[in-house]
Image (cartoon, helix red, strand yellow):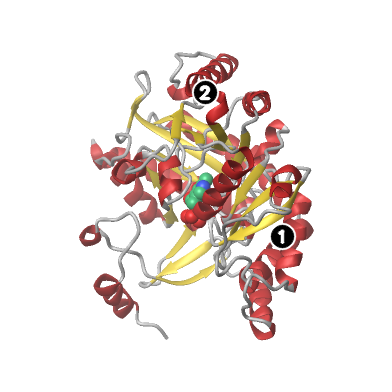
Amino acid sequence: MTDPQRTYELDRKHVFHSWSAQAEITPMVVTKADGSWLWDGDGNRYLDFTSQLVFTNLGHQHPRVVKAIQEQAATLCTIAPVAANDARSEAARLIASHTPEGLDKVFFTNGGADANEHAIRMARLHTGRHKVLSRYRSYHGGTQLAINLTGDPRRWPNDHASDGVVHFFGPFLYRSAFHATTEAEECERALAHLEQVIALEGPGTIAAILLESIPGTAGIMVPPPGYLTGVRELCDRHGIVLIADEVMAGFGRAGRWFAVEHDAVVPDLLTFAKGVNSGYVPLGGVAINEAIAATFDHRPYPGGLTYSGHPLACAAAVATITTMEEDRVVEHAAALGEEVFGPGLTELAGRHDWIGEVRGTGVFWALDLVADRTTREPLAPYGGSSPAMGAVIAACKAEGLLPFANFNRIHVVPPLTISAEDARAGIAMLDRALAKAADSLV
Ligand code: PLP
């Protein structure tokens, strides 16, 4: 039996936390988790509307994934990447069977940031070019190149050597950089802008365009139809490698196996992590097309990781993907988006003036909270917090809902396996929390 108080005290004494002012945090001690629910040290139960950092796609403690890890541990716990092993071969086969056509080789990493780092390295060596274009309002990971590629405030204190990275504006109608008023206009102007950036940077210097198929942490901004196709065309015209970062949007989150399928686009490289094995053991990777893989047929790929394709992580991926296939988890996620989250959250917006926009798809939704619907002034500043957002978060927790909050947004990102009943219960908790938070500030 664990002692939650001791766990907390040891954490505060010895654990250095990510992205945090160490003296200002009070981490929740989680003592138990099951499906879409978890419990804190005081025995309070919460509905997990976060999937943690949007990775427990099958929920907590899925018995099939837990069993696969246990069995793999008993058979072959670990082995160096140079050796072929069952779990890795099977995971690679399953991943390649779901990635867009032609992405048939998989390079395994420990997570999403290193997947992006390796994808860029492959693109640079393949093209012999150096520059990489990526979007503002994006997140690509915490390692040095990945944080430089990131277009959110976490880059600000970290951007010491941009290393050929150039940022551009992607489509985001609600806060349009192009003064567009329709999705079609936003799409057209965003593509024209990207075309200009390419021309002014010098197409022959650009190795890759890296973008999240649906930017996640930055606000779940589903691109207008035709945008990704337009980016694909620009890449083809200029010999630029298109890298789709599907670390958050992939493996069913957006109601498709991969979010690029919404626009039927085939990238040259696709990076993944999180949902590939529900985050039960760290795993990420790059799915590679034939042309780029062939670059390294007779020339060594100059990169690798000690734990590339770790058997425990790959066994969890095999169990996760097989479960997703057999239980039709992606179809369930798409239906939840259309029947529960879309209508339910839109209805919420009818009752709360704070909700400026509801956007998303599948089990991947954002509420863009505003202080004023006309001016669209965010309820918290970009990169910051506010008493109103603090009140919303506190009210959610008091309702028994664990919310994913980022600046002025609440993201609704529970496990893909959440039942329609729990999803509706969570939306009702959010409803009550928004009302209570608004009352508390009057
Ligand atoms: N790319 C995207 C789209 C992400 O959302 C994340 C993490 O949230 C990453 C990359 C980085 O992944 P990791 O934290 O596993 O390195």
Query: Dot 1 corresponds to which residue?
Result: 321
Q: Nearer the viewer, mark 1 or mark 2?
A: 2
Q: Kindly identify the residue that appears in the image at 61 percent across and 70 percent down.
A: 310
Depth check, front residue: 21 or 286: 286
**Residue type for callout 1:** Ile
**Quarter that holds the N terminus:** bottom left
Horizontal and vertical percent position of residue 255: 67, 43
**For the residue with label 2, is its CB less than 8 Å from the closest atom of ligand 1?**
no
Q: CA distance from mark 1 to mark 2?
A: 41 Å
Q: How many marks?
A: 2
417 vs 392, left or right, is right
Q: Specify few, some or many for label 1: CA neighbours under 10 Å numbering under 14, 14-19, or 20 or more.
A: many
**Residue closest to the far front:** 298
**Quarter of the figure with residue 327:** bottom right
Percent across and percent down for residue 315 are: 68, 70
The amino acid beneath tag 2 is Gly
Q: Is residue 6 above or below residue 240?
A: below
N-terminal of the pair, mark 1 or mark 2, is: 2
Q: Position of residue 233 (x, y in %)?
A: 67, 24
Determine which residue is flagged by label 2. 202
Q: Find out if the beta carbon at label 1 lies less than 8 Å from the nearest ligand 1 atom.
A: no
Query: In terms of secondary structure, where does tag 2 sit?
Result: loop
Instruction: Give whichever of 149, 99 is nearer the camera.
Output: 149
Neighbour tally class for label 2: few under 14, some 14-19, many 20 plus, Cα within 10 Å: few
Q: Is residue 338 left or right of residue 182?
A: right
Quarter residue 192 falls in: top right
Picture residue at 62% right of the left edge, 74% below the top: 80
Question: Which residue shows up at 56% across the image and 13% down it?
Answer: 185
Quadrant (top left, top right, bottom left, bottom right) of the C terminus: top left
- Identify which residue, 313 or 252, lies in the foreground: 313
Image side of residue 242 versus residue 150, left or right: right
Residue 425 visible, this angle: no
